[in-house]
Image (cartoon, rainbow, N blue to C red):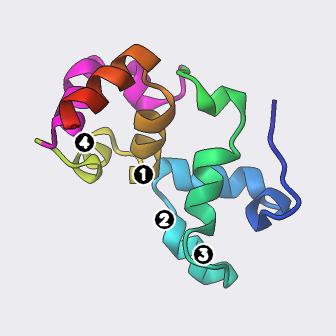
Amino acid sequence: MRKVLKSCPLCQHEDRDYLEEMILSGELQAAELDRIEDWRSGTTRKHMQNHLGDYHDNSNESCPMCVAPNRAELEGAITDGSIKPSRVAKMLDVGVDMVNLHMKKHLKPLVQRSASMEIA
């Protein structure tokens, strides 16, 4: 189900789908869109994390991290801090927002809990 919030300028933007895809592909950075549209800093990032809807909120075949052959290795390296999400984004030729979305939304709860225990 697609989320559309009246208070979110990106949810209400006429080019929402196009802008979301540009951000996920790395062709446009979230902070850059905030500057272009004169939105408060963090508006686009918050939208990308909370308003994309069920398809992007779960593992899916269009997520480069979900389908990467070395997915577990990449997730582990990001979790333990041995590699930055920006480096993984370059490796997969996607935007860092896509990698961050994957790490926040696509990990199974058991993996998230285990990772958070390791970080703590």
First of labels 4, 2 by sequence position: 2
- Taking the spot 21% from the left edge, 37% from the top edge, the residue there is 119
Question: In front: mark 4 or mark 2?
Answer: 2
Q: Amino acid at mark 1?
A: Gly
Q: Mark 3 and mark 2: span between their CA atoms?
A: 9 Å
Circles 1 and 2 in contact, beta carbons < 8 Å: yes
Q: Residue furthest right?
A: 6
Q: Mark 1 and mark 2: span between their CA atoms?
A: 7 Å
Q: Return the residue at label 2.
A: 29
Q: Return the residue at label 4.
A: 91
First of labels 1, 2 by sequence position: 2
Q: Return the residue at label 1.
A: 95
Q: Return the residue at label 3.
A: 34
Magenta segment: 61-81
- Taking the spot 53% from the left edge, 21% from the top edge, the residue there is 59
Question: In front: mark 3 or mark 4?
Answer: 3
